[in-house]
Image (cartoon, grey):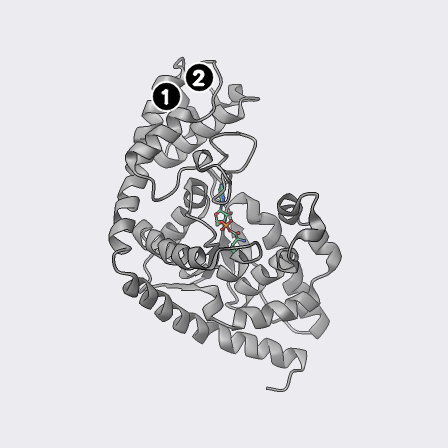
Amino acid sequence: MQRIFSGIQPSGIPQLGNYLGAIRNWVNLQADHECVFCLVDMHAITVWQDPQKLHEQTLAQTAILLASGIDAQKHILFNQSAVSAHARLAWIFNCVSRLGWLNRMTQFKDKAGKDRENHSSGLYVYPNLMAADIMAYKATRVPVGEDQKQHLELANDIAQKFNHDYGVEFFPQVEALIPPAAARVMSLRDGTRKMSKSDPSAQSRIEMTDDADTIALKIRRAKTDSEVLPDTFDALEGRPEARNLVTIYAALADISVNDVLARHQGEGFGPFKQALSDVVISAIDPIAKETQRLLQDKAHLVSVLRSGAERAQAIAEPVVTEAEKIVGFVK
Ligand code: TYM
């Protein structure tokens, strides 16, 4: 059975893009993989996080993942900082990875923008820690949204260079599992920007804890154009907001984008948004309600993470100890 590793930053409440790009795929992959899912709190602090909020968001994300269908008994769910092997391997990878490789990372360029000098060094070496997350488990498959593809290519480069430099066949190559539909969900306010849990505008995203009224309102207010829906997806070229809403509908209803248009062609956005709201609410509302229930028992959520960390540690510790021996550290 192949081992899956994937992670999500507890830097906010997960949004619909996280769900469609990653979480839903994680849930499905549990049937035939050994899965390790991680709340990457060390990645989160590469940009400033209010400590109390980080703590609360980590527990809220645990609840959301359980409510979405992650089975924390059969599989592993934990927070990154609880397993020190991640930080140790990340340091080794800081010394394997090249500055030139990091300079090419588009996510760093997007996040740092023009004010590069004022960002943390952690943000810059973020992809090395991400490679360590995966390689500490020798995971071979990593389900992510499209925005993480470049980081996974870097993880493979680091693994290959480690193996080459030390003359070993130690770390495997990983395969990115990117969902065929909705691999990149866009903002509800701007169809050219990615939907993100850290966008300053909460109107730009559907959060996994939004109730039905909030979802309906956000969709009603979503930016659109004044044209009607055509009969094929190709005809939506140049209409990013419309493409995004049709894509979300298709992914959640589990039908093709052209099937969505076959149902709604000729409609304006008033009726289409109503239909879309129904589809989004029927997917998200049960998860939001179950999340609220799970959040009543914080001690249980902490114990889920603790048990996950113990089991994660049992896998990662021998791998990272071996990597340290390969490097020449006295153990
Ligand atoms: P994060 O927290 O930004 O996002 C978690 C997952 O959600 C996906 N995603 C999206 N998919 C589609 N449309 C969107 N708008 C959208 N926004 C986010 C992301 O691709 C991701 O799969 N660096 C990672 C976390 C990480 C990780 C890892 C992932 C740390 N270590 C090791 C895999 C393996 C991140 O910031 O995800």
**Cα distance in 3D space between marks 1 and 2:** 9 Å
> Which dot marks residue 248?
none
Residue name at image x 34 percent, y 44 percent? 209
For badge 2, the amino acid type reads Leu
* Residue that mark 2 sits on: 229
Is 119 or 229 nearer to us in this picture?
119
First in sequence, mark 1 or 2: give its number.
2
> How many numbered tags mark residues here?
2
The residue most toward the right is 100
- The correct choice, above or below, for 224 with respect to 247 in the image is above
| Beta carbon of the mark 2 residue lies under 8 A of ligand 1 | no
x%, y% of residue 327? 67, 78
x%, y% of residue 147? 56, 45
* Residue that mark 1 sits on: 272
For badge 1, the amino acid type reads Phe
Quadrant of the drawing holding the N terminus: bottom left
| Beta carbon of the mark 1 residue lies under 8 A of ligand 1 | no
The residue most toward the bottom is 330
Quadrant of the drawing holding the C terminus: bottom right
Is 78 or 236 nearer to us in this picture?
78
Residue name at image x 72 percent, y 71 percent? 165
Label 1: which secondary element: helix
Q: Are marks 1 and 2 in contact (CB under 8 Å)?
A: yes
Q: Is residue 286 visible?
A: yes
Within 10 Å of the Cα at label 2, are there few (<14), some (14-19), or many (20+) other Cα atoms?
Answer: many
Residue name at image x 40 percent, y 13 percent? 266
x%, y% of residue 195? 49, 38
Answer with left or right where residue 69 lies relative to residue 195.
Answer: left
Q: Is residue 173 visible?
A: no
